[in-house]
Image: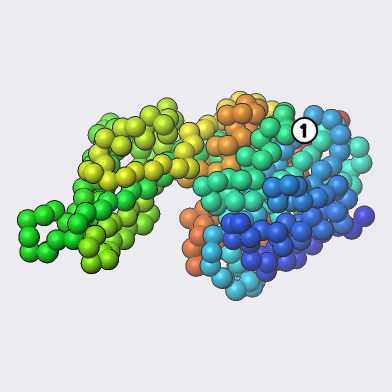
């Protein structure tokens, strides 16, 4: 049985562009690599790269193999591996593959490892995670996202996207008519004020309702002026997307609003065998473990509420480099994360 060169495994994946909706080539790459390493592997109907090993209760390792746009030349420089997806999140999924390959040498496992390189996580659709959510009932789940090799992510905030369009007959800018772009801005101001009111007395970002302007544009065809605005909201625990959408709809200022990408925040427990296995693995590798709560979203938001099993997110990399022009992972950290994951999986999957 071949054993992987983890750096070559990740570097090969980084050289294959895979923006959301265009992941087929990198899915086939990971399937071929996993098959060579002893996993039963295939591309499923959603386009996910799936690898399976062992028998018994399922442990799902759910990463994502799509990226945001942006070409970053793939290279190793000063101990850092650069490339789009090195952190978010081909690096964490390659960590899954490399650790599982080591367990393939261990012989019979007391659990079934299911690795899923999901598609469209970076899109609001989360197509890959939604496809598998009713196909497995795992005893534990590990989400492949950057946490840093010593940290475990226990929760993610929710999300809601509000898309608005405002139209009105064209008017002279010197007239008294409120400009259509100002109506869009008034909606944004109302959203920001509502969030500020909800956040009063809440010090932690994870507890706050955080709005941001994603896009804003305006124009005219000579008869009708128009403006479009997309607002993204990061939802704390307890805020339901549908209820929030109803609140925001009251501030439309004559515009047409549409809402999409809604998901609730999700936070896992930290007193369970999965967490304990990772704590042991981090300490065995010489680290001091800690916990994180992320202000973004991940596929944990999709599968966590359904599977209701022990769940956490883990992977090498500094999440502040997500989506940036300088995205890279420290090679030493990547290799250490493989050691940690292998130790955690051994504690969970070996008889």
Residue 164 visible in the current orientation: yes
Q: Is residue 153 above or below residue 243?
A: below
Quarter of the C terminus within the rendering: top right
| Residue located at (79% from left, 62% from top) | 5
In this rendering, position of residue 348 left or right of residue 229 = right
Residue 118 spot, x, y in % from top left: 66, 48
In this rendering, position of residue 311 left or right of residue 254 = right
| Residue located at (36% from left, 57% from top) | 215
Observer-nearest of 287 and 253: 253
The picture quadrant where one finds residue 306 is top right
Residue 139 spot, x, y in % from top left: 72, 28
Observer-nearest of 16 and 278: 16
The picture quadrant where one finds residue 160 is top left
- What kind of element bears circle 1? strand
Residue 218 spot, x, y in % from top left: 28, 61
Quarter of the N terminus within the rendering: bottom right
Q: How many marks?
A: 1
Observer-nearest of 343 and 107: 107
Observer-nearest of 314 and 113: 113
Residue 328 spot, x, y in % from top left: 58, 63
Tag 1 residue:
58
């Amino acid at each position: 049985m071949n054993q992987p060169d983890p750096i070559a495994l990740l570097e090969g994946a980084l050289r294959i562009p895979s923006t959301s909706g265009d992941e087929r080539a990198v899915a086939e790459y990971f399937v071929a690599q996993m098959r060579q390493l002893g996993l039963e592997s295939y591309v499923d109907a959603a386009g996910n790269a799936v690898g399976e090993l062992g028998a018994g209760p399922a442990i799902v390792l759910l990463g994502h193999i799509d990226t945001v746009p942006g070409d970053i030349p793939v290279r190793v420089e000063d101990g850092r591996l650069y490339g789009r997806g090195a952190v978010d999140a081909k690096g964490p999924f390659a960590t899954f593959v490399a650790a599982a390959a080591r367990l393939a040498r261990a012989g019979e496992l007391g659990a079934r490892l299911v690795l899923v390189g999901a598609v469209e996580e970076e899109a609001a659709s989360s197509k890959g995670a939604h496809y598998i959510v009713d196909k497995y009932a795992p005893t534990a789940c590990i989400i492949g996202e950057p946490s840093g090799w010593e940290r475990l992510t226990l929760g993610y905030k929710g999300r809601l996207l509000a898309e608005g369009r405002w139209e009105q007959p064209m008017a002279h800018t010197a007239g008294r008519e409120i400009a259509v772009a100002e109506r869009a801005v008034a909606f944004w101001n109302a959203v920001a004020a509502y969030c500020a009111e909800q956040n009063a007395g809440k010090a932690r970002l994870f507890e706050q309702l955080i709005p941001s302007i994603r896009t804003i544009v305006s124009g005219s065809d000579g008869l009708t002026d128009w403006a479009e605005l997309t607002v993204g909201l990061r939802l704390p625990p307890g805020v339901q997307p549908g209820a929030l959408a109803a609140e925001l709809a009251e501030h439309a200022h004559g515009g047409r609003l549409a809402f999409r990408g809604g998901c609730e925040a999700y936070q896992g427990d930290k007193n369970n065998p999965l967490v304990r296995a990772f704590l042991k693995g981090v300490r065995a590798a010489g680290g001091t473990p800690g916990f994180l709560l992320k202000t973004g979203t991940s596929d944990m938001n999709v599968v966590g509420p359904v599977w209701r099993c022990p769940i956490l997110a883990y992977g090498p990399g500094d999440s502040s480099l997500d989506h940036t022009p300088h995205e890279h992972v420290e090679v030493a950290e990547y290799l250490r994360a493989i050691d940690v994951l292998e130790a955690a999986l051994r504690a969970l999957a070996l008889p």
